[in-house]
Image: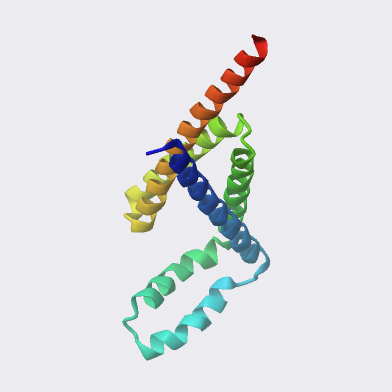
Amino acid sequence: MSEQKIYLFFLLSVLLKALNGVLEIIFGIALLFTSSIAGVIKILIQGELIEDPTDLIANTIQNLLPFLAHSQYSISVYLLSHGTLKILLIVGLLRKKLWAYPAAITIFSLFVVYQVYRFSYSHSAWLVALTTVDIVIIVLTWHEYRMLRTKKAEIQNIGTK
């Protein structure tokens, strides 16, 4: 695979991660300033459950509502901090700041460790998908970091000759 294609794949994956971070921030703010998001969601899914009591998505959401109602503030803080951290790291990566690469690799690796831990309890397919994406991003970030360091070293060597 050519370096240009690898970089485009890296760029696409980082932009998708940024979109994920923005959505986390939006949902975190919504949870923080909504007194009872669980009540609103319950009203929204009631019609679907009346129409089809076996609806998989509506039942899954309904089963998650007690968790959401009791930990809304915690979820909000988690989403806001997680999303903000992602955005800060991605801005550094897009600006090709050398500090951002090892920081992103470290933070995203910690996300992977936490997601694997959560998977051991939930067995969620979403966590497998998210963890896989994070691992791909870590590998691509490491590759881009090595390429950027090599280019900067070559420029410095040319300047000292």
**Quarter location, residue 31:** bottom right
Residue 111: where, in percent of width, then height?
47, 43
- In the rendered view, tell whether residue 136 sits above or below residue 49: above
Q: Is residue 74 visible?
A: no
Residue 71: where, in percent of width, then height?
54, 60
**Quarter location, residue 92:** top right
Residue in the foreground of this view, choosing between 69 and 154: 154
Q: Is residue 61 left or right of residue 73?
A: left
In the orientation shown, which residue stands out farthest toward the bottom?
51
- In the rendered view, tell whether residue 82 sits above or below residue 58: above
Q: Residue at 50%, 79% (x, y): give it.
A: 42
**Quarter location, residue 37:** bottom right
Residue in the foreground of this view, choosing between 19 and 126: 19
Q: Is residue 131 visible?
A: yes
Q: Is residue 27 left or right of residue 48?
A: right
- In the rendered view, tell whether residue 5 sits above or below residue 44: above
Residue 131: where, in percent of width, then height?
40, 47
Q: Residue at 34%, 75% (x, y): give it.
A: 56
